[in-house]
Image (tube, rainbow, N blue to C red):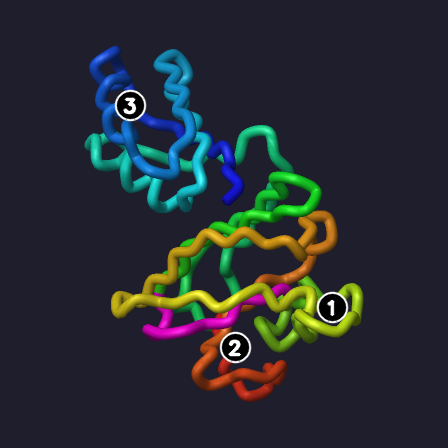
Amino acid sequence: MSTTKIEFAVQMTCESCVDAVKKSVENVEGIKSVDVDLKTDSVVIDSNLSTLDLQKKLESTGRKVAVKGYAGSSAAVSILEAGDRSIQGVVRFVQVTPNVCIIDGTIDGLKAGPHQISIHECGDLSEGCNSVGNIYNSNNKSGRMYGNIDTVFAEKNGRAAFRLEDNVIKLSEVIGRSFVISDKTENNKNEKKTGLWYYC
């Protein structure tokens, strides 16, 4: 699995803070390297773990932690802000190579179970999920529809946390479009009018 470099702002005041931060991510499977800079309160982690998993490990030190971004990659962020207001989340897209896009997200407020995530034709959120168009299909080839990304699972607490490696999606083709999550148990078709589309 491909790795991404994620930069965090971590509140640190001394070398013992640096040691605590390093210890929190030491010997963790999936972490390739860690660079801690006390002067800039910066921690850059090269890993194949989700942003949420890394943030939790850093927060276990008792320090304030914020995600700053992805180092050295083309990246975009989708903040869920239309549709069902009880659902909140952030999904990050990182083009790590010309053929690999990492999709890393955390979404809260979902019903437990499977949910379909997809990219839709339009970025128009004026009518919530009713104005985003159909699932985006740039190539109209047989097989997987381009924007039909995958199924993710929400736990009993309503949280879906995921990190996917996608070999179809190209970041340059999805910027300006919408990200949609729907309840897969009730809606397996591309019909938004059923009202089962949660969020975009």
Q: Is residue 46 visible?
A: yes
Location of residue 132 (image quadrant): bottom right
Q: Secondary structure at mark 1?
A: loop
Closer mark to the observer between disc 1 and disc 2: 1
Q: Nearer the viewer, residue 66 or 185?
A: 185
- Residue named by callout 3: 22
Of labels 1 and 3, earlier in sequence is 3
* Residue 27 among magenta residues: no
Q: CA distance from mark 1 to mark 3?
A: 43 Å
Mark 2 falls on what kind of element? strand
Mark 1 vs mark 2, CA separation in Å: 18 Å
Q: Amino acid at mark 2?
A: Trp
Q: Residue at x 68, y 46 (%)?
A: 99
**Label 3 near label 1: C-beta < 8 Å?**
no
Is the residue marked by circle 3 packed among few (<14), some (14-19), or many (20+) residues within 10 Å? some
Label 2 crowd bin: few (<14), some (14–19), many (20+), radius 10 Å: many
- 69 vs 141, left or right, is left
Which label number is shown at residue 197? Answer: 2
Q: Main secondary structure of the magenta part?
A: strand
Q: What x and y, as percent, mark residue 106?
A: 41, 55
Label 1 Cα neighbours within 10 Å, binned few <14 / some 14-19 / many ≥20: some
Residue 115 included in the magenta stretch of the image:
yes
Magenta residues span 109-119
Pointer 1 residue = 137
SS type, badge 3: helix
Q: Which residue: 29% across, 20% down?
A: 12
Three-letter residue code for mark 3: Lys
Q: CA distance from mark 3 to mark 2?
A: 42 Å
Looking at the rendered structure, the kind of residue marked 1 is: Asn
Q: Residue 68, percent across and down?
A: 47, 33
Residue 102: x percent and y percent?
Answer: 55, 48
